[in-house]
Image: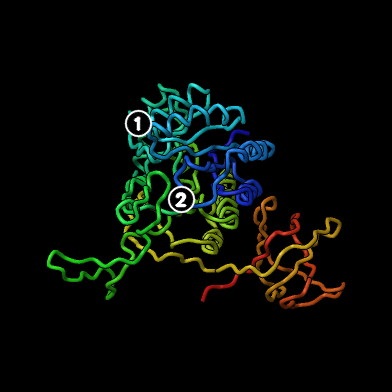
Amino acid sequence: MIKIVELMAPSRDFASLNAALSNGADSVYIGIDGYNMRANVANFKREDIKNAVNLCHDHGVKLYVCTNTIMKDSDIESLNELFPILNSYKVDAVILSDLGALKIAKENSIDVHMSVQSNLSNSESLNFLKEYGVKRAVLSRELSLEEIKNIKSKTNLEIEVFVHGAMCMAVSGRCFLSSYFYDKNANCGECLQPCRSEWKLLSKDSKEVIIEGNEKLTHFFSPKDLCMIEHTPELIGAGIDAFKIEGRARPADYVATVTKVYREAIDKYETGNWEFNEQWVDDLKKVFNRGFDTGFYFKKPYKTSKYNESTYIKKDIGTVCNYYKDVSAAEIRLWDSLKVGNEIMIQGTTTGSLIQKNVSMQIDGKNIEKAENGQNVGILVKNKVRPNDVVYKRILRK
């Protein structure tokens, strides 16, 4: 069956990779140490890439590797060593923004996706890149849906757009705040996000300018997160080839939740009986977010946001000791309380992120409603979990 659109999920480690695979991703993109735009978080080491590729391909999922930082001569030279290795591992594509990196990728027969960092905003640029062997372009975030439709009508290059996740105050991520304040190069993956802090605006005569209500300190550099779940039909109708979820710095539960929601929406559209489900937004609000907006798709974004507006927080409460396949149960050692009815997450490198309600709990074969710190309890689980997986409890944010 030909997919009408590819759903692409982020992964920062094997836990989030497995979360993406178990929740319906068609492809996964990862970072590799030293070459991507998320240098300050966990990334895959070179020796991990082969295992990641094999795991994805065993699930019928594609794996893309980000090498999209600004490239200097020393960086370009190192790609002559890296790209043959990635080719031997059979990665499905590299995501890059540098023309020199494009040349080396093509010399090593690796498919290329041009990154959003390239700020691609017109069909002439896409057609030019297609002549040089580029397979896909990640379009600039600053385009409207009508502009995207127009571009797609004038090119047969694959196009990819972001549909969910953090928005940046800079044009396609080209920001210099971290360089100015901290001597860290955001365009080489070292962004420290000073834009997410509270700021005070002064006028020319040093008078304080009120931005929101009576507040003098505001988050006017920090836009809300992108969320296009309600507009899935319009995006598919525009001819977009791939939906990209932002979040390579986000944990496995974020990847699991967002991937699952967009998978359900795409599948619902494919049935021909599209109906928006309000529960999708409720689920998206449970994981890290700065509130939701539609970015530049329909208007210029203007809403600002604090650091996190998730409706829930997650608290680690225990670890898995054993898993009993015959009865689909796990033994949990607790260091905090747990009740029947609590929503829990079990996360681990191979498990990914299992999210479910705690529907049944036992100690010594007897049903209980609540367990306390220091107790070992048995709970029913929907899928296989593994010893040393961490157990979290979702708590409604007050």
Instruction: Locate residue 392: give its quadrant.
Output: bottom right
Crowding around mark 1 (Cα neighbors within 10 Å: few <14, some 14 to 19, many 20+) is some
Q: Quadrant of residue 227?
A: bottom left
Mark 1 secondary-structure assignment: helix
| Quadrant position of residue 366 | bottom right
Indicate which disc, 2 or 1, sits on the residue closer to the N terminus. 1
Q: Which mark is residue 231?
A: 2
List x then y, in percent, for residue 147: 34, 40
- Report the front residue among 329 and 23: 329
Name the residue located 59 percent from the left edge and 72 percent from the top edge. 395
Front label number (2 vs 1): 1
Q: Is residue 174 above or below residue 282?
A: above
Disc 2 and disc 1 in contact, CB within 8 angstroms: no
Look at the picture and state if 271 lies above or below 294. above
In the image as oriented, which residue stretches furthest toward the front? 74
Find disc 1 in the rendering and name its residue: 123
Give the left or right position of residue 372, taking residue 250 as reference.
Answer: right
Locate residue 278, reporting x and y percent. Answer: 53, 61
Q: How crowded is mark 2: few (under 14 residues within 10 Å), some or many (20 or more)?
A: some
**Residue 243 appears left or right of 362:** left
Q: Distance between the residues labelled 2 and 1?
A: 23 Å
- Position of residue 143 in the picture relative to residue 252 (left or right): left
Depth check: 117 or 1 in front? 117
Tell me what residue is drawn at x 33 percent, y 34 percent.
122
